[in-house]
Image (cartoon, helix red, strand yellow):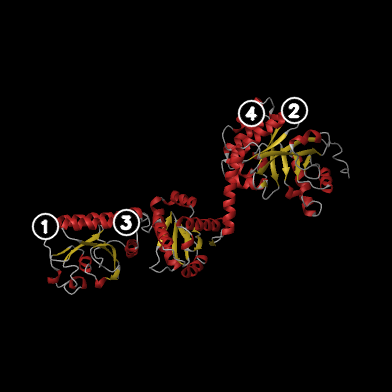
Amino acid sequence: MFSGLNQDETKKLAALDLLRRDDTPRDRILGEFARLASTVMGVSGCFVTIFDPKFQYIKYAQNITLPEKIPVEQSMCQHSVYACESIICPDARQDNRFHHHPLVQSGAAIFYAASPLKTRDDFVLGTLCVTEQYPVKPSQEKIDQFLHIASLASAYLEAWYSVGQIDTLTGLPNRQNLLNELERIVQSKTTELHTLLIFDCIEIPRLYELSRYLGVAAVETMLRNFGALLRLRLDLSRTIPLYSFATGRFAVLVKANQASAIVEKAERMPPTLASITGDIELQLQTHTGYALFCPSQTNGQEVFRHVISALHEAIRQGVPVKAFDPVLDRKRNDDFKLLYDIGEAIKAPNQLYLVYQPKISLHTGETIGAEALLRWDHPTRGNIPPSTIVALVERTTLMRDITQWVIRETIRQTLLWRKSGVYLPISINVTVSDFSVPGFASDLERQVHKAGLACEDFRIECLETDKVLESDVALMELDLLKAKGFLILLDDFGAGYSNINYLRRIPIDIIKLDRSLISQITTDEASLVIVRNVIVMLKELDYQVLAEGVEDIATARILKAFGCDEVQGFYFSRPLLPERIPEWMGTTGLLEGLES
């Protein structure tokens, strides 16, 4: 039937599967071609068909009654399709191919003309037909016009298929095509449950990495092969379309009762091996997200969002398959809303504010500084924990906006304290995203000097220290900050993996021991030994040592005995509102009971 083709069978069937589905805008345009053809030929009837190997599907009909779907062998158009050529039959009753056909015997199609709708490589998609209830002998000019209209309809169908519905790289139906099918199911108002699955076969950064080593052509070949390999591993029936959702991502839309077998295979799917060179191969893990939905209760874009949410959760957790979780999705949506709210809070006059936690010298008992800590009083959710704020904004430009807000507010508050006779160095937390902006140090110096303050009045607490080492700009800005007179404090030393290389490469004045390092020194002998030796080492390297999270007298006593220089924590003081700092500065006897 589809002779003379140079495309693989899978692609042909995918094309026909797309064409035989209902598509109102497309079928309306096909109807325009059919009506134009009937007008040119001077007849009243016309119709357009799409064929697959088994059936003929009517996409449009005028002045002739036809079943929407019939077996190929029962159609008049089979002869045009099989021969891949046009047929002009002035009187079908006199033609052995048609005289027995019900349409002819009933008088509905005495005159019949058909032209195959085909691609440039003779891939037959269907037919454009015109009919009349009596014999007609059209002129050659009319026949030529009819054939020209059929060729235009063919070109339209090929463009519709290849440009709007097909991924050019893989030859698979694309995301828009999938959305169209989703919307068609939704509009059907069926209550039968369906499942959409999306498979991620390669992360985009890894794709760029492979392009660098293998070249673009080799990677494109790999991407094309992903689809065939995925279909094989999932053991998909030929009747189930595989969609190209995005680069390296594929999708399957099935009824819910078909999904469990696919999910089970996805959970057991082995890694894909990508050969780089020789015996070196990369393992590419496939991740899958899926969502069950009722078409009558949702829409296509929302289904997309749910499945993408599940897919990215699978990638984030490093698991092969993840179902859509509405509870987790609501949390993510709430987080996204909070992210927007933070941007608004920065502009608002009374949502963000700072509290200050005093730092106490273990040598003199004096308050020798304070750490500025951000707080957020959300208008509807109340107090938002600082950890939540940081987790939301740390990978966005809002991190820089917040840092600049903290800097401005700290400078403003320092000036107010100075007017009341309070001189207190303040620590400001700064992330690598701030340091990585060229000119950060000079801009901070300008702000401080413009306020009439000195750089020595402020400490810079360096967060994300491991990432600082990855950025030449961040290291340069830290060097500049130290050169300008700012004290540099390495935050959270001892939390997780602390690379001793920090101490050689970053211009640090003060090392801040994380609460996780000191929290067990009163109950765990190993923790006690570690903290003692860490303090001894840091002191021998001529660093000032500050311990945070000191919550009881026993811990404070041990730290003092070990030679720790400064402490901060609830035992001495919780973070204070700025108006309480002047009163706090008069507090004495903070070291009472610490002498062993």
Q: Which mark is residue 418?
A: 2
Helix, strand or loop for disc 4: helix
Identify the mark at residue 14; answer none if there is no mark: none
Q: Which mark is residue 447?
A: 4
Separation of marks 4 and 1 at Cα, in angstroms: 86 Å
Q: Quadrant of the N terminus?
A: bottom left
> How far is disc 1 from disc 2 in space, using C-alphas?
100 Å
Answer with left or right where residue 541 lies relative to residue 215: right
Q: Amino acid at mark 3?
A: Arg
N-terminal-most mark, 3 or 2: 3
Residue labelled with disc 1:
140
Q: Which quadrant does the C terminus fall into?
A: top right
Q: Are marks 1 and 2 in contact (CB under 8 Å)?
A: no
- Say if mark 4 contacts mark 1, CB within 8 Å: no
For the residue pair 56 and 571, the one nearer the viewer reads as 56
- Amino acid carrying label 1: it is Gln
